[in-house]
Image (cartoon, rainbow, N blue to C red):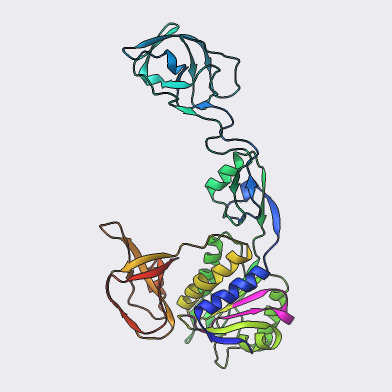
């Protein structure tokens, strides 16, 4: 007997445990294709950054000891060092060298004066405003030392982290393979956008919503044609997908109605981990390993569009993150309610809301009064889910609550 009507915390713990046991293998990808992937192995710096002392400004490299404490200092210009290949230039007492940003510091120098603070006359440079010792000099290794761990397994490869890896000369990175994901929508009532509606039909909005959420996370999901409310066709399609993908996502046909065939199919041929979670919206959500239907993990979401959004953000996204070994959790903030809210149900609730900043800089969230799971406009007008704990209670304005940004 699978777990049913469990708490949201239990559901998350089960998803974490199953995903950890199914961690996806690592692969090597070109640096240019690594953006958004999860790093699979630590990166240790092979070289220091900067690799040599260099100038932070366009100006003149000099010996700080040569500067006069009272009045201007005039130094003899003996050469120039531009960014690029280092030249054999050594600066002695009373001398200086022209230098550009990023150029290696010539031997004998320890300070750079900005070009704007000098006057050049022939081969002599007058320092009009003396820099402090070592000013405008970037020291070798001040950012990264050789042998230092600079990126960790589980890090998401942001553009800044990719740049850090590039600064080490790495052309490839070892990353977790991204999961292959397929999306099913179900129901005889669904019609594709652009086609005419017959009485009793609605347009299929869940497919585009779920496909968009997956693409926004850097995945390349595959959408199947809408499944009719026919158990044989549902079984055939899910069996095929279960042998071809890492994760199968379905929308609809997961409750206890006459046309909800997915729970019975997975109870009979899969390994159901849980069915029904004490959450609102999205209670009928089902999570299973494929069993006889293949090696895929099945996350079966309810059919109402807001339920799809809530269950994906709260359960689906953490599942795919965990499969890739993502170390850092997604943003989970706390904000003050702009206005009061009465929670009348016992389940943990995900309410739609819009984040904003107060005059004092604190984070606020305004709940949307349209809280029905079919009311997609409320979700479209919002940018976060407000997390209200189990149990009915009053939430006065100003109450601090957890929020989950889209």
Q: Residue furthest top?
A: 122
Range covered by the magenta-colored residues: 282-299
Quick check: 292 above or below 140?
A: below
Q: Which quadrant of the figure contains the N terminus?
A: bottom right
Quick check: 156 above or below 334?
A: above
Q: Is residue 230 left or right of residue 384?
A: right
Residue 289: x, y in percent? 67, 78
Residue 282: x, y in percent? 49, 80
- Residue 193 visible? The answer is no
- Which residue is drawn at the image coordinates 45% and 76% (left, top)? 306
Q: Is residue 115 left or right of residue 238?
A: left
Q: Residue furthest bottom?
A: 258
- Which residue is drawn at the image coordinates 67% and 59% (left, top)? 177
- Asked whether 258 or 100 is in front, the reply is 100
- Asked whether 5 or 301 is in front, the reply is 5
289 magenta-colored: yes
61 magenta-colored: no
| Badge count | 0
Q: Which quadrant of the figure contains the C terminus?
A: bottom left
Q: Residue furthest left?
A: 359
Quick check: 24 above or below 307?
A: above
């Amino acid at each position: 007997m699978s777990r049913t009507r469990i708490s949201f915390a239990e559901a998350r713990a089960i998803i974490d445990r199953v995903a950890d046991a199914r961690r996806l293998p690592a692969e090597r990808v070109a640096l240019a294709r690594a953006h958004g992937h999860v790093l699979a192995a630590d990166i240790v710096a092979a070289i220091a950054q900067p690799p040599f002392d260099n100038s932070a400004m366009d100006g003149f490299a000099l010996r700080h000891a040569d500067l006069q404490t009272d009045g201007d200092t005039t130094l003899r210009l003996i050469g120039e060092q531009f960014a690029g290949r280092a030249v054999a230039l050594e600066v002695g007492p009373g001398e200086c060298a022209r230098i550009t940003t990023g150029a290696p510091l010539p031997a004998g120098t320890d300070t750079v004066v900005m070009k704007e603070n000098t006057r050049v006359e022939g081969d002599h440079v007058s320092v009009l405003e003396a820099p402090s010792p070592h000013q405008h000099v970037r020291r070798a290794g001040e950012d990264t030392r050789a042998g230092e761990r600079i990126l960790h397994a589980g890090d998401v490869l942001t553009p800044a982290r990719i740049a850090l890896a590039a600064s080490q000369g790495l052309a490839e990175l070892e990353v977790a393979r991204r999961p292959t994901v397929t999306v099913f929508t179900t129901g005889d009532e669904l019609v594709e956008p652009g086609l005419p509606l017959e009485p009793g039909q609605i347009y299929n909005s869940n497919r585009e919503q779920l496909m968009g959420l997956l693409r926004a996370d850097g995945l390349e999901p595959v959408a199947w044609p809408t499944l009719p409310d026919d158990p044989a066709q549902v079984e055939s399609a899910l069996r095929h997908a279960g042998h071809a993908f890492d994760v199968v996502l379905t929308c609809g046909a997961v409750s206890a109605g006459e046309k909800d065939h997915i729970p019975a199919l997975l109870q009979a041929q899969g390994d159901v981990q849980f069915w029904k979670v004490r959450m609102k919206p999205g209670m009928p959500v089902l999570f299973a390993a494929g069993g006889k239907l293949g090696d895929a993990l099945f996350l079966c979401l309810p059919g109402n569009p807001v339920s799809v959004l809530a269950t994906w953000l709260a359960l689906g996204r953490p599942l795919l993150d965990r499969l890739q070994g993502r170390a850092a959790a997604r943003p989970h903030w706390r904000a003050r309610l702009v206005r009061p809210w009465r929670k009348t149900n016992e389940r943990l609730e995900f309410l739609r809301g819009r984040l904003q900043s107060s005059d004092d800089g604190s984070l606020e969230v305004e709940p949307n009064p349209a809280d029905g799971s079919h009311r997609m406009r409320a979700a479209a007008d919002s940018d976060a889910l407000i997390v209200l704990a189990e149990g009915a209670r009053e939430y006065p304005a100003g109450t601090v609550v957890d929020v989950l940004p889209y």
